[in-house]
Amino acid sequence: MSSETSAAGRRVPIDKAHPAVYQAQLGVAKAVRHATAEVGFDRRTVELLNVRISQINRCAFCLDVHVGAALAAGESTQRIAVLTAWRETSLFSPREQAALTLAESITTLPDAHTQERDYEYAHSILSDDEISAVSWVAVAMNAFNRLSIVSAHQVRAR
């Protein structure tokens, strides 16, 4: 078992220490990609959610990965730049707003009343299957954020 030294101290890269568990997590990500495509969410929207979740969790490694993936999927630099303040713009469709609301709520786990309000708003726009797919995006991305943060994965200059 190896470890890395970083600003966070000596960390065990858990993806390398237990590769079978990491492979299972990659399998979850693949299933989530399939589920989101099945309900009509394009790659751009999924990556937008991944970026927003990673912003909330302050996961530099995942931000580096998913901002690049979002751009490659056709996302604009303008929308990525204002993503932390998406509610203050008119750049996001109602469907994207509902998905962002739900993903943020699942990530931050606010009080029960706020969670219910967020869910009801999302449900006013998204179908049950779309809510499930967005929920799985948030669950999976939160898991990857934690994996990278716990392991102190480093962003490398390109």
Image: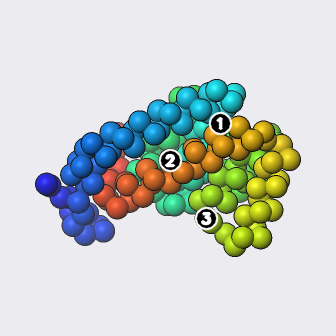
Mark nearest the camera among 3 and 1 is 3
Q: Nearer the viewer, residue 98 or 30?
A: 30
Eyeballing the image, is 152 above or below 96? below
| Residue marked by disc 3 | 108
Quadrant for the C terminus in the image: top left
- Is residue 155 among what the camera can see? yes
| Residue marked by disc 2 | 140
Mark nearest the camera among 1 and 2 is 2
Mark 3 and mark 1: Cα distance apart in space: 20 Å
Position in image of residue 74 (x %, y %)? 61, 28
Position in image of residue 155 (x %, y %)? 35, 50
Question: Which mark, residue 127?
Answer: none
Who comes first in sequence, dot 3 or dot 1? 1
Residue located 42% across and 58% down the image: 146
Left/right of residue 17 with respect to residue 137 in the rendered view: left
Eyeballing the image, is 112 above or below 45? below
Left/right of residue 132 with respect to residue 121 in the rendered view: left
Q: Secondary structure at mark 1?
A: helix
Quadrant for the N terminus in the image: bottom left
* Residue farthest right in this picture: 124
Left/right of residue 138 with respect to residue 82 in the rendered view: left
Residue located 32% across and 59% down the image: 152
Question: Which mark, residue 45?
Answer: 1
- Is residue 44 among what the camera can see? no
